[in-house]
Amino acid sequence: MRIAVTTPTGNVGRHVVTMLLRAGIRPRVLARDPGRLDPGVRREVDAVAVDQRDAEAVVAATAGVDALFWVDPPSAGPDPLADYAAATKSVASAVAANGIARTVFLSSVGAEKRRGAGEIDGLAATELALDALGATVTHLRCGYFFTNLESQLDAVRAGVIPVVLPLDLPLAWVAPRDVAEVAVARLLSGGWSGRGVQAVHGPADLTWPQAAAVVSAATGRPLRAERVGDDEMRGLLRASGRPDGVVEAVMGMSTGLRDGFVPEQPRSLRSTTPTTLGSWAYEVLRPRL
């Protein structure tokens, strides 16, 4: 079985690669800089240097594969949705040109809105493009990654995480490793076809105060969530060096999902995964604080 994996050093992609290796698969990995791969992993994969926003290069890099794990690469440019559009063109071109039998796409809760959710709108556009091909594809609509807390280390150390969501709004929190397990199960299975959506919601829905309490108990540091206004959050994001386009794309992921939004896929046995926020925070976050 020939499987291609994008973003092989990312929060989910790196786990997908190692799980495929343990399953006896030598994956083809598409990376902007293969030199960033762990040397041990680098010896066990077929690495291709490719820009995922270069459609011609992606088509060439995925020739002959049976299955593809696709992640739209993150954007730090002034127009994130334009970057997502370029990545969407790449994956749609590759699936169509190479007749890729199965694609697993890393999407997000909120993509079902199709518009009005900031950066998530770029993922929605990728879903629509793959659906339009009539391809066999599973869209993984994931909850809020635990690893997002790693980009907020200063706030965690200071003991206060600013949020623009209502403090009583529960979110699905999920470990990227659990997302990878779901993705790999799909990649390795030939028993499905057509278009499908698989929610990956983690073990529990948590409000921000509940999540802060869990992280505080796991790390031994006091932590609370504090709601701030939209303009204040924009100021904090700009102060971190993000351009205005990125600020609005990030803001939209919260503001677009706070007023009565309900995920299309309800929590179920299939969407619930095992790793708890507390165990992840103890193992991963605590040593970094």
Image: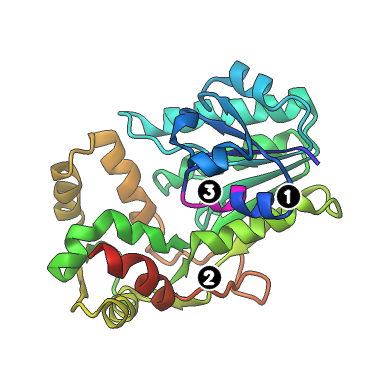
Discs 1/3, front: 3
Residue 113 on image: x %, y %: 52, 52
Magenta stretch, overall SS: helix
> Where 262 falls versus 68 (above or below)?
below
Q: What whole-number distance in Å separates the C-alpha atoms at marks 1 and 3?
A: 15 Å
> Where 77 falls versus 13 (above or below)?
above
Q: Nearer the viewer, residue 100 or 226?
A: 100
- Label 1, on which residue? 187
Residue drawn at (53%, 70%), measured in percent from left and top? 202
Q: Could you say whether the residue bearing mark 2 is in a helix, strand or loop?
A: loop
Residue drawn at (39%, 70%), measured in percent from left and top? 283
The answer to which quarter of the image holds residue 57 is top right
User: Is residue 163 visible to the viewer in this orientation of the structure?
Assistant: yes
- Label 3, on which residue? 14
Q: Is residue 16 magenta?
A: yes
User: Is residue 229 visible to the viewer in this orientation of the structure?
Assistant: no
Q: Earlier in the sequence, mark 1 or mark 2?
A: 1
> Where 125 falls versus 263 (above or below)?
above
- Label 2, on which residue? 202
Q: Quadrant of the C terminus?
A: bottom left
Q: What's drawn in magenta, residue-wise? A: 11-17
Q: Earlier in the sequence, mark 3 or mark 2?
A: 3
